[in-house]
Image (cartoon, grey):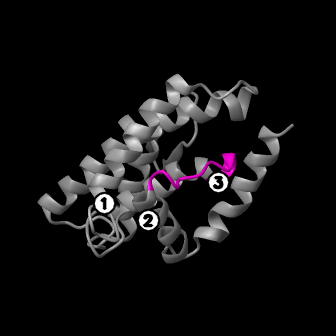
Amino acid sequence: LNPAHTVPTMVDGSLVLFESRAIVTYLVDKYAAGSPLYPQDIEKRAVINNLLMFDIGTLYKTMSAYFYPALLFKKEYDPATEAPMTDALQVLGKLLSDRPYLTGSDISLADIVVAGTLSFVDVAAYSLDAHPKVRDYYSALKKDLPYYADVNDKGIEMFRKYSQK
């Protein structure tokens, strides 16, 4: 199904998608068209797409480079990979500005995806205190996203236990 042999992979009829951001945008378009999560307005959607690309190309990339070697392969955390992650977290703080969510007053698909990326800090017990806007934003998202705990807490705990073996 997936030539990259990665997860996630989604099949819907004859459609096969294997990139998480493509999957979530498709699902919202199909099942919640017009939702504030991913509005039909082209400019609002462009802002969300930009944030989704920032997440996969910068935030997730730098956080996974820092956390995965330690969490999956028992390597020491590398300060050389922490610096780019810190830069990405600073950018995220600037993107938030004084807004509660990345695009303003409503939770968007970008916030949901970024919450998933930020969950690295929960697995690794990494403090976001050096990034107070990001710390407060992530804490608020975990409270404000319906079902966040139901969907994520068990997986975070399983990943944490796996990384401690």
Q: Residue 104 falls in which quadrant of the image? A: bottom left
Residue at the far right: name it.
Answer: 165
Q: Which residue is mark 3?
A: 122
Task: Pick the residue in front: 147 or 16.
Answer: 147
Kindly identify which residue carries mark 1. Answer: 96
Q: Secondary structure at mark 3?
A: helix
Q: Is residue 126 magenta?
A: yes
Relative placement, left or right, of 81 versus 77 is: left
Q: Amino acid at mark 2?
A: Tyr
Q: How far apart are labels 1 and 2 at the CA level?
A: 8 Å
Q: Is residue 1 visible?
A: no
Choose the circle earlier in sequence order: 1 or 3.
1
Q: Quadrant of the C terminus?
A: top right
Judge whether residue 112 is colored magenta.
no
Identified at 24% across, 67% down, the residue is: 39
Write the residue at 70% across / 35% down.
71
Query: Residue 7: image x %, image y %?
Result: 58, 39
Residue at 82%, 40% in the rendered image: 164
Q: Position of residue 140 (x, y in %)?
A: 48, 72
Q: Position of residue 150 (x, y in %)?
A: 66, 70
Chain part drawn in magenta: 122-131
User: Which secondary structure, mark 1?
Assistant: helix
| Residue drawn where x is 65% and y is 27% of the image | 69
Q: For the stretch drawn in magenta, what is the main secondary structure?
A: loop
Q: Which residue is mark 2?
A: 137
Q: Are marks 1 and 2 in contact (CB under 8 Å)?
A: yes
